[in-house]
Amino acid sequence: MIKGLVQDFKTLFNHSGAVEVFFSPGRVNLIGEHTDYNGGFVFPCALDFGTYAVVKRRDDNIFRMYSKNFEKLGTKEFSLDKLINTPSDNWANYPKGVIKTFIDAGYKIDKGFDVMFFGNIPNGAGLSSSASIELLTSVILKEIFKLDIDMVEMVKLSQKAENEFIGVNCGIMDQFAIGMGKKDNAILLDCNTLEYHYAPVELDGASIVIANTNKKRGLADSKYNERRSSCEAAVKVLNENGINIKNLGELSVEKFNEVKHFITDEEQLKRATHAVTENERTKTAVEKLNSGDVEAFGKLMDQSHISLRDDYEVTGFELDSLVEAAWEAKGVIGARMTGAGFGGCTVSIVKDEFIDEFIKSVGEKYKAKTGLTADFYVAKIGDGSRKLGDF
C-alpha cells in the first residue's frame, strides 16, 4: 500500500526522488469516558490502523495538502504567513492549526511542504481521526525541521491546536493515546497530572471488536461542550461550599456521596455522578485486567455504558441499540460506547471463537432496529505516531 501512496503523491505533486512516509494511529478508549477533561483517569490504546502521510519539503513557504479521503475537495494551499482557520480549507485546518501552534510555541518552521494524507479510520466514527492527523503533523514537523521536542510536548501542542485553532474543547486523551501508544498495551493516564503507565492487554483468547454505528455526528457542534460546562458548574458549587477541588476526578465515590447534596441542579448532579463513578470504575478495571480477571473488566465496561446512557446522556438510540445487541450475543465479555458519543463507535471484548457469529447477529439486530448498517473492525493494539521511512 505504501508504494502505491508514494506513487500517487509523486504523480499528484509532480515530484521525483526520495520522499518521507509517516503513520499515526487511531485510538479506542477501553474505559474511562468523559473523564479526561474532568481530571480523571482514562484507559485508551492506539490501534493498528490510522492515517498515513507522504511528505516532501519545499524551498518556499507554501504548504500544499491533499487527502485521498476528501478527493473532491482537491488540493488545499496556504502559506506560512497566512495560518488562519478558513472554513473552505475544511480538514486541512487541523494540520494548519498544528503548524501555527508549533510556531507560536517558538519552534522554527521556515519552509513549507507538500503532503498527501490517507486515512483508514472511518471519518466521524469517534476513533479520533482529528487527533491522528494532528499528531501525524507534529511528527512530520519534528522530523523535517529537526526540532528538539519530545512526544509529550507534541501531544500538548496538538491538543492546544484543536482547542484554540479548531475551537473544540477536547481533553488530552486522544492526542496522548495516539502519540504515546505502545503495541499490545493500553495506557492508564491521569489526565490531571499526565502521569501514566502502560498496562499489557492480555485478553486470553478474546479480541477487541469495534463497531461503527454509521450515525454521523460532528464533535464541534455536538453536546460535548454542554456536558463539560455542567461538570465545571458542579465543581464551582462544591468549591462555594468549602470542597476545595479543581476537578471532579479528585473525588472518590465515598467523598462524593458525602458532599453531593450541595449540588441542587439535577442535571449537574447526574453529570458529576458519571464523572466520579466512571473515574473509580477505570482504576478498578485496570486492576482487574492486571490480575488477569478479564470477565470483571468486561462487567465494568457494561456499567460504564449504563452510566454514559443514564447519567451523562451521551449515547442515543443507535449506540444503545448496538451495545444492547452486543450484550445479548454469545461470547461477549463486555461492551460499551466509546468516544464522545451521539453516534460513533462501540467497543466490545469478544471471545475469538464467537467473533464471526457476533458480527452477524449484532449487525442483523442493529439493522432491524435502526435501519442502519454497522461496520465492524477486529482491532489490534499498535504503536504511536512515527516515521515509517524514506521511500
Image: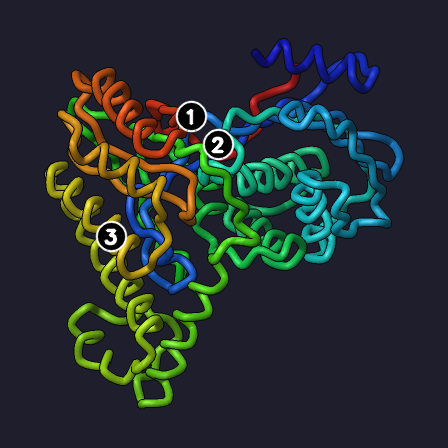
Looking at the image, is 335 positioned above or below residue 155? Answer: above
Q: Residue sitting at 23 percent across and 19 percent down?
A: 355
Q: How is the image coloured?
A: rainbow
The amino acid sitting under disc 3 is: Thr
Instruction: Say which element carries label 3.
Output: helix
Q: Is 178 left, or right, of 190 in this rendering? A: right
| Residue bearing mark 3 | 282
Q: Nearer the viewer, residue 206 or 54?
A: 206
Q: Quadrant of residue 228?
A: bottom left
For the C terminus, which image quadrant? top right
**How packed is label 1: few (under 14 Cα within 10 Å), some, or many (20 or more)?**
some
The quadrant holding residue 389 is top right
Residue pointed to by mark 1? 48
> Which badge, 1 or 2, comes first in the chain's sequence?
2
Disc 2 crowd, CA 10 A, few/some/many (<14, 14-19, 20+): many
Q: Which residue is mark 2?
A: 25
Q: Residue furthest right?
A: 60
Residue 2 occupies which quadrant of the picture?
A: top right
Q: Give the alpha-carbon distance from disc 3 to disc 1, as whole Å.
A: 23 Å
Instruction: Choose between 191 and 280: the one closer to the eye.
Output: 280
User: Could you tell me how far apart the alpha carbons at marks 1 and 2 are, in whole angstroms?
Assistant: 6 Å
Q: CA distance from mark 3 to mark 2?
A: 23 Å
Residue type, numbered disc 2 = Pro
Q: Is residue 139 above or below residue 342?
A: above
